[in-house]
Amino acid sequence: MAQQLIGFIGAGNMATSLAGGMIAKGIRPARIWMSDPSRDRLDEVSQQHRVHVATDNLEVAQRVDALVLSVKPQMMASVCADLRSVVEERRPLVISIAAGVTVANLRDWLGEEVPIVRCMPNTPALVQAGATGLYAAEGVDDSQKALAAQVLGAVGLTFWFDNEQSLDAVTAVSGSGPAYFFLLMEALIDAAKAQGLDAATARQLVLQTAWGAAQLAITSEAGPDVLRQRVTSPGGTTAAALEVFEEAGFREHVQAAVAAARERSEELAG
Ligand SMILES: NC(=O)C1=CN([C@@H]2O[C@H](COP(=O)(O)OP(=O)(O)OC[C@H]3O[C@@H](n4cnc5c(N)ncnc54)[C@H](O)[C@@H]3O)[C@@H](O)[C@H]2O)C=CC1
Ligand SMILES: O=C(O)[C@@H]1CCC=N1
């Protein structure tokens, strides 16, 4: 694994965070290749990370042991069509991070024999605090699984799943999940302003509280339920607020929202 080369097709936000995370974890930049049609983007990336770059996807595919497909889902079919002959001939491990693109889609586009790992990362990968679900299709060996875990593990935690359908649940929970927390932050900032706090202070209070709560939950042995109870004095302010949330059906809304996201993920996967 030490000398294997990793290529990213598409040098966008997710690809550059993954590469940045890998380099921060000690992988030599010389092992990383990136292709993108945008010369400006590649110049930026090679300056920042010192990785190899190419405007031609095939140049990267011809060199690497693992190919991370990191273009937008709607680009995937055409990008794969161009890569197909090289991939069929060389059989690199293909790692897809595209939402809603299935192993069956990738096999259609790249050939039946290609080893594929499908992943669902999330945007906190951009700050090395990601959570990624991974699924290895049949034909992926242990060293290839280790390589995929090394790539995605460079930007956060990784979790393997035995069946591909689980990735729909992962998408609904941790893939889309950052947006749920951002919505709560937005709503709390608005509420803070409605209570007379200035916008900048409201923002800082809310973000620090979100960060602190996450840190506390991650580092504490107690679960979120116990931590919530510890904040809540009987008859106090938190109890007054939580009662409003519960009466409004907060938990049921979260259940319904996640179910809707899962359903949409299944629809997108076809
Ligand atoms: N936003 C999210 O929460 C998550 C996104 N993803 C997936 O990550 C993938 C990449 O997303 P981002 O990095 O946010 O997108 P992005 O738009 O930042 O990057 C895509 C890159 O692909 C390049 N590109 C376009 N056409 C190309 C081609 N023919 N060949 C090579 N490169 C080409 C673009 O120039 C761009 O730099 C998507 O498939 C998305 O579904 C995965 C998990 C979470
Ligand atoms: O909203 C979406 O469809 C994608 C999948 C997970 C995050 N963004």
Image (tube, rainbow, N blue to C red):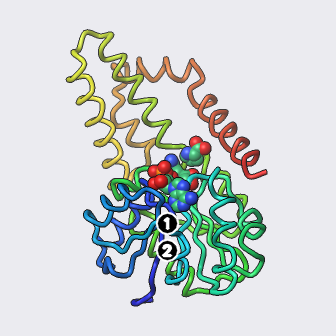
Q: Which residue is mark 2?
A: 149
Tell me where residue 205 appears, x and y as whole percent.
24, 29
Q: Amino acid at mark 1?
A: Thr
Q: Amino acid at mark 2?
A: Ala
Q: In the figure, is residue 245 to the left or right of 110?
A: left
> At 71% across and 72% down in the image, what residue appears?
110
Q: In the figure, is residue 241 to the left or right of 107?
A: left
Mark 1 neighbour density, 10 Å: few (under 14) some (14–19) many (20 or more): many
| Residue 217 visible in rendering | yes
- Identify whether 187 is placed above or below 33: above
Q: Which residue is mark 1?
A: 158
Q: In terms of depth relative to the viewer, which is nearer, 167 or 249?
A: 167
Tell me where residue 199 appears, x and y as whole percent.
25, 19
Q: In terms of depth relative to the viewer, which is nearer, 88 or 214?
A: 88
> At 63% across and 30% down in the image, what residue appears?
252
- Disc nearer the start of the sequence (1/2): 2
> At 41% across and 64% down in the image, what residue appears?
18
**Quadrant of the image occupied by residue 257:** top right
Q: In the figure, is residue 103 to the left or right of 238?
A: right
Tell me where residue 261 appears, x and y as whole percent.
65, 40
Q: Are marks 1 and 2 in contact (CB under 8 Å)?
A: yes
What quarter of the picture does the N terminus occupy?
bottom left
**Quadrant of the image occupied by residue 126:** bottom left
- Identify whether 223 is placed above or below 90: above
Q: Give the number of the mark in front: 1 or 2.
A: 2
| Residue 122 visible in rendering | no
